Amino acid sequence: MQRNAPTPVIMTLSSHDPSGCVGIQADIETSISLGCHCTPIVTALCARDTRDIKDVTAVDTGFLIEQCRAILEDMPVKALKIDYLANVSQVEAVHTILKDYPHIPLVLNPARSMANLDRREGNAVLEAAKYLLFPATTLLCPDIVEAHQIAQQGDTIDACAQEILEAGGDHLLISGTRRTQNTYENSLYNSQGLVRRYTWERLSVFSHGSGATLCASIACYLGHGLLLSDAVQQGQNFAWQSLAASRRLGMGHGVPNRLFWATSTIEGERRRGSDGGC
């Protein structure tokens, strides 16, 4: 009997968000939805709800290294995704680990995701990431606000992109480079400049976790062996579908439904059952 194709293993480094909007739960849900196995590495514990963050406690750097090494020495990791690093020590540790695994594609969600409640430390984390992590990155995924935080000298979107890629990294996907009443545009760049613009229907619902979902889904598609251009296209489509199906589970922002296809299937089964189907 022929064996099934191996399930891609995706390692993600992020915080634990108890609301489930971002962090390791977002990565696990996305990985499951896209047929991957997530090995989540906890970088920090957060106290937050669907409205805002209350507090952050960083995981000990030595324990962070132990988590990563345990998986990388045991499983064939097909893609890496980094979303939240709590301090400069963690950035330095991850840099050391990445040097041993240069063949694994890395998707990095920088800037605001790499800052805790202390703004000065958050800026130090970002600067360390630019120097140590950006050069090892396959795809950087900031939104437009984060892009301007990283590239403060850039007076246009294209200039920001050029400045960011000069710090390192193969490709850059900036979300929200252009908004209209009905559309939302993302832009993909490489060292030569703009590669492609993607236009999506603008959603009326506001959900927290769009960036985490987008980065995790792209990492999953890279883990399945897709070319970067295809992974970026499919990852955006998955993120849009998840956001469109968001649910308001608390008193704050909506929570992306990363298992939207399963919800649709269950609702269909319920309808058939109420109609007297077997």
Image: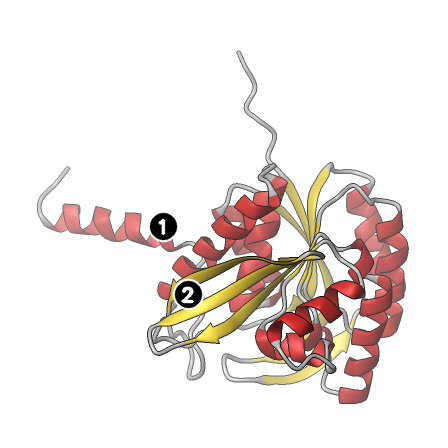
Q: CA distance from mark 2 to mark 1?
A: 12 Å
Quadrant for the C terminus in the image: top left
Residue 127: quadrant of the picture: bottom right
Residue 11, above or below 200:
above
Q: Which residue is mark 1?
A: 261
Residue 82: percent from left, percent from top:
70, 60
Q: Is residue 31 in view?
A: yes
Lateral position of residue 267 relative to residue 88, left or right: left
Three-letter residue code for mark 2? Leu
Q: Residue at x 66, y 82 (%)?
A: 155
Residue at screen point 85% across, 71% down: 128
Looking at the image, residue 7 sits to the left or right of residue 33; the answer is: right
Left or right side of 4 for 115: right
> Would you say residue 257 is visible in this rendering?
no
Task: Mark 2 or mark 1: name the one nearer the start of the chain.
Answer: 2
Residue found 88% across the figure and 50% down from its top: 99
Q: Residue furthest left?
A: 276
Q: Which residue is mark 2?
A: 243
Residue at coordinates 66% horizontally, 79% vertically from top-left? 148
Frontmost residue, 54 versus 137: 137
Side of 132 where 3 appears, left or right? left
Give the residue furthest to the front.
192
**Residue type beneath disc 1:** Trp
Residue 72: which numbered mark, if any?
none
Mark 2 surroundings: few (<14), some (14-19) or many (≥20) residues within 10 A = many
Residue 238 drawn above or below residue 15: above
Secondary structure of the residue carrying numbered label 1 = helix
